[in-house]
Image (cartoon, rainbow, N blue to C red):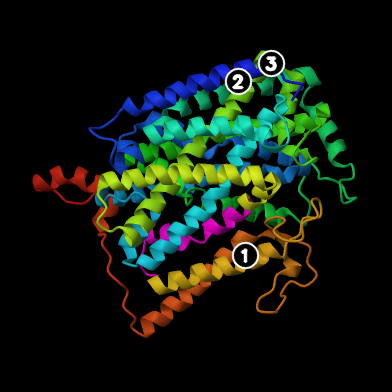
């Protein structure tokens, strides 16, 4: 740690201290009469307006991993990394109507988690438990990835030691995060998101104007990036290209669509939605959030700029291998003044704290409502629920920290790809259930089990020739290797496809067939605590004055 970048560290430290103070003060911001209730601690009192919700959801979905690892994917593989752009563009229109319905029914019944909704919709504690555990399993590696992004910045600033001391700055940052999240709940990341998003916009806009001027224009950057990607990689083949090849076009399309379908199934994404004060706020945000996609598109181009400048990843002192996630921090460190680089690093660092806090709160809500209260203490009071959630949020944070300290961070990145496959298997029970209860609860359980099992089997079979890992090496499978109970329908095909898309298709097919079987055998459907009007509660209220005046009661 002898080569410390003191100016960058100073700017980073000042801004980090400022958001820490904001985190502690957030407990009094828009607070209700008590913080001893999950609605207050875990959902901010369900009172956030349009601007707060916009910054909160944006700060939640566009994470430190987005700012360092997605451009690093373009640096490593080229055009495939652009899948993140169409996926965020189509995600918000896809989610517009379902999320308004989720907000409405959750407001009426006091649902805090997607598993709460499943429990009420199907009357099945087992299905709700499976949805809760799936959410926890998919969220944990996502939290760990925020640490990967934060550590990449710390490593670039010279804090790159081995052993425990090498992780000490990260530990200090997350102790601070844990304490103010414990005290302030969702209000802390909601308030800090204003700072985080403002910094990110400033940094990206300046970078996207300054770098082309310095490097000779975008045509020069693209030419240099294309030449660099054409060079042989670790396996002897070209690293990538500026255009998709015939074998990965289907992978690109299915990965983008699958990721879009999965985005708002993550518990932390729904937490931001349920904290909104009205369905109108949700609708406004689904219309306005694509502005982040513009920022993301500009950010992705920095991966090509890093190729054009010849930026080299910092070697991780703990593993002895280059950390490709450091290429964007290295780009800023080499091309910008130290004070601006410190500003950029602070934006990425704070960009790790905001989503990590929201994710840990969402995971804590799942544990408290759908495991602790359902199976361990049914008579828990709201105050006891909140205390349990606070403790669970600490366990989740330090569990993710332990994963980074004791496990190769590269494996965490692979786990995030697995997380997308996992969370997609909740789509029939959560998203489709907002519109129809046609599926039988046992059919949804059977479909979930099929999608999870087949998804894991396919993921297990995928190697990573770059890292030498034989299993769980990515999320793209060659169609030629796709097996249906031993039958290979696409033998010899090199076309790749996103595993999550295949697993979801199997999930839906099984759910449909088992539903038809259960209906034929007259298996009880189970109670539904929700009513049709619960999903459109705001419209019902708006129509009430018309009905009272003798007019029609529907809109």
Q: Residue extending furthest front? A: 164
The quarter of the displayed image where residue 48 is located: top left
Q: CA distance from mark 2 to mark 3?
A: 10 Å
On screen, 473 above or below 340? below
Residue at the image point whose x is 61% and y is 50% from the top: 416
Q: Quadrant of the N terminus?
A: top right
Q: Position of residue 497 (x, y in %)?
A: 68, 60
Of circles 2 and 3, the one toward us is: 3
Dots 2, 3 in contact, CB < 8 A: no
Camera-side residue of 447 and 316 = 316
Q: Residues within 10 Å of mark 1 (few under 14, many from 20)?
A: some
- Residue 149 visible to the viewer: yes
| Residue bearing mark 3 | 6
Q: Within 10 angstroms of label 3, few (less than 14), some, or many (20 or more) residues?
A: some
Residue numbers of the magenta segment: 417-440
Residue 12 numbered mark, or none: 2
Does the magenta portion include 35?
Answer: no
Q: Horizontal placement of 485 versus 517: left or right?
A: right
Q: Which residue is mark 1?
A: 456
x 26%, y 46%: residue: 382
Label 3 vs label 1, nearer the camera:
3
The residue closer to the viewer here, 547 or 1, is 1
Q: Position of residue 224 (x, y in %)?
A: 85, 31
Expressed as whole percent of the image width and height from the top left, the position of residue 305 reads 76, 29
Q: How far apart are the two marked residues, 3 and 1, measured between alpha carbons?
A: 45 Å
Q: Residue at x 28, y 42 (%)?
A: 37
Image location of residue 388, percent across then percent down: 36, 47
């Amino acid at each position: 740690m002898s080569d410390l970048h003191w100016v960058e560290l100073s700017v980073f430290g000042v801004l980090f201290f400022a958001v820490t103070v904001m985190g502690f003060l957030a407990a009094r911001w828009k607070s209700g009469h008590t913080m001893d209730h999950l609605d207050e601690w875990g959902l901010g009192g369900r009172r956030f307006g349009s601007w707060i919700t916009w910054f909160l959801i944006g700060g939640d979905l566009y994470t430190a991993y987005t700012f360092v690892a997605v451009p690093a994917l373009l640096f490593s593989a080229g055009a495939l990394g652009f899948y993140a752009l169409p996926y965020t563009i189509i995600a918000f229109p896809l989610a517009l109507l379902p999320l308004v319905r989720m907000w409405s029914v959750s407001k009426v019944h006091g649902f805090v988690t997607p598993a709460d909704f499943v429990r009420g919709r199907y009357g099945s504690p087992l299905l709700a438990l499976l949805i809760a555990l799936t959410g926890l399993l998919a969220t944990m590696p996502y939290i760990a990835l925020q640490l990967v992004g934060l550590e990449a910045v710390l490593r670039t600033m010279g804090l790159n030691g081995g052993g425990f001391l090498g992780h000490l700055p990260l530990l200090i940052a997350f102790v601070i995060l844990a304490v103010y999240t414990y005290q302030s709940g969702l209000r802390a990341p909601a308030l800090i998101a204003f700072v985080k998003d403002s910094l990110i916009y400033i940094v990206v806009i300046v970078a996207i104007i300054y770098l082309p001027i310095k490097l000779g224009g975008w045509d020069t950057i693209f030419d240099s990036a294309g030449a660099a990607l054409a060079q042989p990689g670790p396996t002897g083949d070209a690293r990538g290209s500026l255009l998709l090849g015939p074998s990965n076009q289907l992978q690109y399309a299915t990965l983008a669509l699958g990721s879009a379908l999965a985005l708002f199934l993550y518990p932390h994404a729904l937490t931001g939605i349920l904290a909104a004060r009205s369905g109108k706020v949700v609708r406004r945000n689904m219309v306005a959030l694509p502005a982040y996609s513009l920022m993301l598109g500009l950010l992705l181009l920095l991966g090509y700029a890093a190729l054009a400048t010849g930026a080299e990843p910092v070697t991780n002192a703990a593993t002895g291998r280059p950390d490709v996630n450091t290429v964007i921090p290295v780009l800023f460190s080499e091309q910008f003044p130290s004070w601006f680089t410190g500003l950029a690093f602070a934006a990425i660092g704070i960009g790790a704290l905001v989503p990590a806090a929201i994710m840990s709160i969402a995971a804590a809500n799942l544990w408290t409502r759908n495991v602790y209260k359902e199976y361990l203490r049914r008579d828990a009071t709201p105050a006891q629920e909140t205390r349990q959630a606070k403790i669970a949020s600490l366990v989740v944070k330090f569990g993710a920290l332990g994963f980074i300290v004791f496990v190769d961070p590269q494996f965490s990145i692979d786990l995030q790809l697995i997380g997308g496959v996992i969370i997609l298997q909740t789509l029939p029970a959560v998203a489709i259930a907002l519109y129809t209860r046609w599926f039988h609860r046992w059919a949804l359980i059977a479909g979930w089990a099929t999608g999870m099992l087949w998804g894991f089997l396919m993921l297990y079979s995928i190697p990573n020739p770059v890292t030498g890992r034989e299993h769980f090496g990515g999320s793209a499978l060659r169609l030629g290797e796709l097996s249906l109970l031993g039958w290979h329908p696409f033998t010899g095909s090199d076309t790749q496809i996103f595993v999550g898309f295949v697993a979801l298709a199997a999930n839906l097919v099984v759910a449909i067939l088992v539903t038809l079987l259960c209906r034929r055998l007259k298996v009880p459907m189970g109670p539904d605590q929700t009513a049709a009007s619960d999903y459109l509660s705001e419209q019902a209220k708006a129509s009430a004055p018309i009905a009272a005046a003798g007019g029609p009661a529907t809109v």
